[in-house]
Image: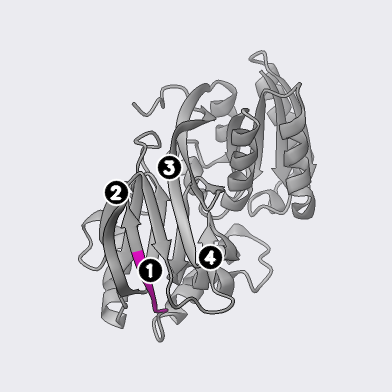
Amino acid sequence: MRIKAILNRDGGTLKTTDIEMFTGGLERAFANVGHTIAVEPVAGKDLIAALQGAGEDGHVDAIIAGGGDGTISAAAEIAWKSEKVLGVLPAGTMNLFARSLDVPLDLDQAVSALARGQVIDCDIATANGKSFVHQFSVGLQPRIVGERDRDDHNSRVGKLLRGVTAAMSSLAEPPVFRADIVCDDEVLEQGDAYSIIAVSNNPYGDALLPYADRLNRGLLGVYRAGLLTADAYVRLAGDLVAGSLNESADLRFSMARRAVISFPELKNGAQASIDGELVPLAAQTEIVIHRGALKVLAPTGEAQD
């Protein structure tokens, strides 16, 4: 394959990586197995332009993106719309999509696995046309992201710790909002109060972090929690740590191919989180799963059948 690799130099892990040495190793690993690859490290502000350039290049078959979940999400949208293969180098804080694909979290191991990887089809979802590979969320998650990202983090660990602090601060006053939820044209709930609504690209698996263990079911995971008391918040955090979110008494769970969420009392400036990035929240959001629409480079043997 003819590959263009775009590395976000401002991504958590890449901030502290010798870029020249890493670039050389990346080029050798792919060239050694017969691929043609060009590597372009860029600053975060130049990331989207570089990804778009790769998407528009008719001589490129695959785009490899190195960075966090926001970088990967942006690259996935461009790869999907340009009908190119996406490769994921996990260089962020959580690396949730990489975990779903079983890509090693160590960068050098990830390079080796992808160089010898295979192309598979996986699902991608959209929220009002904006694609995501992990999750669309309203309520608690956008608040945590907003508080976490107020500071400039010099490392992955620093960003992670700030996220934990932001989550703990929400214990005193959890968010609350009302919503109507329709799944596959059936009214699921109407006018209920929530602290969390999260819609995932395929249901979460039973792991320490909430990410899909398969990406080819063609189903959204629709998760929601009512107004969280401090006790419920602690229980939910415990279920997360135990990898048992799908059985949590404080979290309702459904599956659908299409979900429409309306917010009858939407506040000015309300935000949602898409793959860890804040976006304006619309009064109504239509979320759709696109089964098998995204081609990805995955470690050999991870066909997710």
In the rendered image, is residue 161 in sight? no
Q: Position of residue 34 (x, y in %)?
A: 67, 13
Disc 3 versus disc 4: nearer the observer: 4
* Amino acid type at mark 1: Ile
Indicate which disc, 4 or 1, sits on the residue closer to the N terminus.
Answer: 1
For the magenta stretch, what is the residue range? Answer: 175-180
Indicate which disc, 3 or 2, sits on the residue closer to the N terminus.
Answer: 2
Which of 191 and 31 lies nearest the eye of the viewer?
191
The answer for how far apart the CA atoms under marks 3 and 2 are is 11 Å
Residue found at the far top of this picture? 34
Q: Which mark is residue 137?
A: none
Residue that numbered label 3 is attached to: 289
Residue that numbered label 4 is attached to: 282
Q: Which mark is residue 255?
A: 2
Residue found at the far bottom of this picture? 172
Indicate which disc, 2 or 4, sits on the residue closer to the N terminus.
Answer: 2
Disc 3 is placed on an element classified as strand
Q: Which mark is residue 196?
A: 1
Magenta stretch containing residue 179, yes or no?
A: yes
Indicate which disc, 1 or 3, sits on the residue closer to the N terminus.
Answer: 1
Disc 2 is placed on an element classified as strand
Is residue 120 depicted above or below 95 in this figure? above
